[in-house]
Image (cartoon, grey):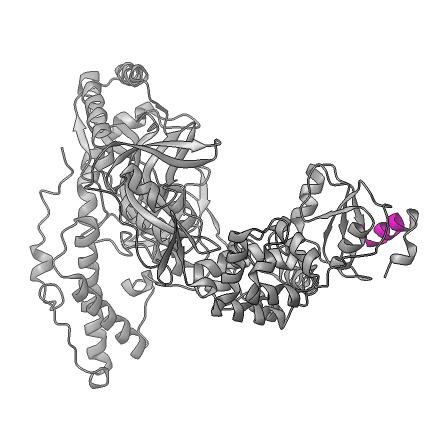
Amino acid sequence: MTVVDEDHDDSDAEDRENPYLRNPPTEFEPLEALSEEEAERQIERLREAIREHDRRYYAENDPIIADRTYDALFSRLQALEEAFDLAHTDSPTRSVSGEPIDAFDTVEHVAPMLSIDSSGDVADVREFDERVRRELREAGFDPDDVRYVCEPKFDGVSMEFVYEDGRLERAVTRGNGREGDDVTRNARTIGAVPGRLHDDPPERFAVRGEVYMPKDAFQAHNRERIERGEEPFANPRNATAGTIRQLDPSVVAERPLSVFYFDVLDASDLEDTHWDELRRFPRYGLRTTEEVELVDSIEGAIEYRDDLLERRDDLPFEIDGVVIKVDDREAREALGRTARHDRWSYAYKFPARAEVTPIVDVAVQVGRTGRLTPVALLEPVDVGGVTVSRASLHNPEEIAAKNVGVGDTVRVQRAGDVIPYVEEVVEKGSEGHYEFPDRCPVCESPIERDGPIAYCTGGLACDAQLRRSIEYYASDDGLDVEGLGEKSVRQLVDSGLVGSIADLYDLEPADLTGLEGWGETSAENLLAELEASREPPLPDFLSALGIPHVGPATARELAREFATFEAFREAAENDPERLESVDEVGETVAEQIHEFFASEANAEAVDDILERVSPREEQTEGGGGDELEGLTFVFTGSLSGMTRSDAQELVEAHGGNATSSVSGNTDYLVVGENPGATKREDAAENDVPIVDEDEFRNLLEDRGLEGDLG
């Protein structure tokens, strides 16, 4: 049985004298031709019409104008409000933008938003029904009159929406059930959240809704993130939760969130039954799902759950069970609640999907070296106790060999208990297999094949490769610049502050403090880290460039052979055969190094870096002794008497090891000025002694190295 609104007649809205409801014009008289009175009248009509179009689109799924026409009306309203300075907080235009906010206020709910008692065992569901009937009989109700409203259990974020005199006053996350975060400005950006209710709503009306991301929209959003080189969301719920608490409402507005409303928390005018409450929601512009039924027995509720379980994969939203609610409001009050959950509702959970699941889309991820990895986007499935929503398809040849396509049902495994991959096709739902693109999904550069592997030819001109290259440049295998992780790199690139690795060295404090989440201390720490990386050891610099197949081990061998970057680059560009004589370098690696520098974009990027960074010459002969043999040091922050690179070279010249990350094998973490927090936290976890620069110098002096100190 579907929730419908049999008594509501839309003709009133349609018959009003409003030219923007049906077949509205999309060409308007010039703004300068309007008087202020005429502009006010047009604004009111446009607001009224847009609210009605929103109600039809979001609450009834029955639009009466095309999207393009709606956009024209919306743009006209924006232009009028701006030209005549007539913007209002209640206007539909205020629901799609907003300035970033610093924090969320904590707000008490108008009524408790409790959790739901649940089980996946049908015996527990029947026991719930027996308890309900027994307690209602004792309270004077006829247990044979008990009816249940059955609803999908949405896998999203539950929120309270409070309307006063029909206007949205606040939207609050569930929080701890008693109070939550005020996210009203974010909620106003969601199209399915009406800023003002329609028809004749109660004077005070607080409803509970579930904010969610539709499955198709989630997969499309994840695909975009993967193609941009960003980490995808694990599932729609995580995507929703991460979005609704963004500090910048404009970010929320860009993400495809929607809402279903499913309960009244408080109202100045209450219906006698939950079913009747649901019937009037669409009249007010509050969107409900069609997947709701009113049943006369618990067996009807169980049948509802089993039917929905069979149709689960076909639903446009993610659910993890059904909710069974006593319909009669007086009966609900008699049943009451515990400290944790209402005693009149129960969730009958679905079993977790196990290993076999459909592929809903395929995205192509661009790696640091330009390698393209196809990723299957899945209906979330349980694999070894972990929910998996994506899996590797490895490469184009693997796709063809397994005949994998969008729509196929596949078996998913986890390699090494970590990386999920598609093992086999269980049931074909597509014709043939996924066809690999011939151009990069990020930068549109041509794709080249090297055996089974596909590569983007865009190099550092490709944004995805740029971000990953910066992350690698700053990583433990590169120059070990703390503070440049995935999130901060994405901020720097997306803000336009950094368009190349070299741009890192041109950053100013004001650039960083203008970004969300950055303060003066974090900005100073990053700039100090970058300053300390301007004279890196040659092996670290060679590894940091991200040359294919040149990791730390190969970089050390190349540095020993060529001693200077200039000598190495000369061989790389003009004498690749000489590279082959180096340990760790064969014909294939030599060719990859040569091709890296043959790329005009890469060569220009390296030249720009060298204008700001001076790799230190590798000392190939002579040197110290074994005074520090067996000791492993890690450095963080800036040293005053010597550069961090000097200190690392000094340690290695006297038999010690200087590594970039703290582990159980580390003997000392040397902390300079403006250190990062990560290494100190790792040192504490591994019981590694932390010493400052003076203590480090004392340690060296104790071992007879006074003359080597700067």
Q: In this view, does 552 lie above or below 545?
A: above
Q: Main secondary structure of the magenta part?
A: helix
Q: In this view, does 677 lie to the left or right of 314?
A: right
Name the foreground residue: 697 vs 353. Answer: 697
Q: x and y percent of residue 620 in the render?
A: 76, 57
Between 282 and 167, the one lying in front of the other is: 282
Q: Residue furthest bottom?
A: 33
Report the residue at 20% width, 62% height from top: 50
Query: In the image, what residue occupies the spot 68% across and 37% down?
Result: 685
**Magenta segment: does it hold 396?**
no
* Residue 387 screen position, x and y as percent: 40, 34
Q: In which quarter of the image is residue 173?
A: top left
Q: Number of marks in the image?
A: 0
Residue shown at 48%/70% (left/top)?
600
What residue range appears in magenta?
692-700
Image side of residue 65 versus residue 349, left or right: left
Q: Position of residue 97 (x, y in %)?
A: 36, 63
Res. 476 in view: no
Question: Where 59 sits versus 500, above or below?
Answer: above
- In the rendered image, the quadrant that contains the N terminus is top left
Pick the residue in front: 352 or 640.
640
Tell me which corner region of the image, top left, top right, bottom left or bottom right, holds residue 411.
top left
Q: Where is residue 335 in the image (x, y as percent from the top left)?
A: 32, 23
Report whether 165 appears left or right of 577: left
Residue 645 shows in the view: yes
**Quarter of the C terminus within the rendering:** bottom right
> Which of 113 and 418 lies nearest the eye of the viewer?
418
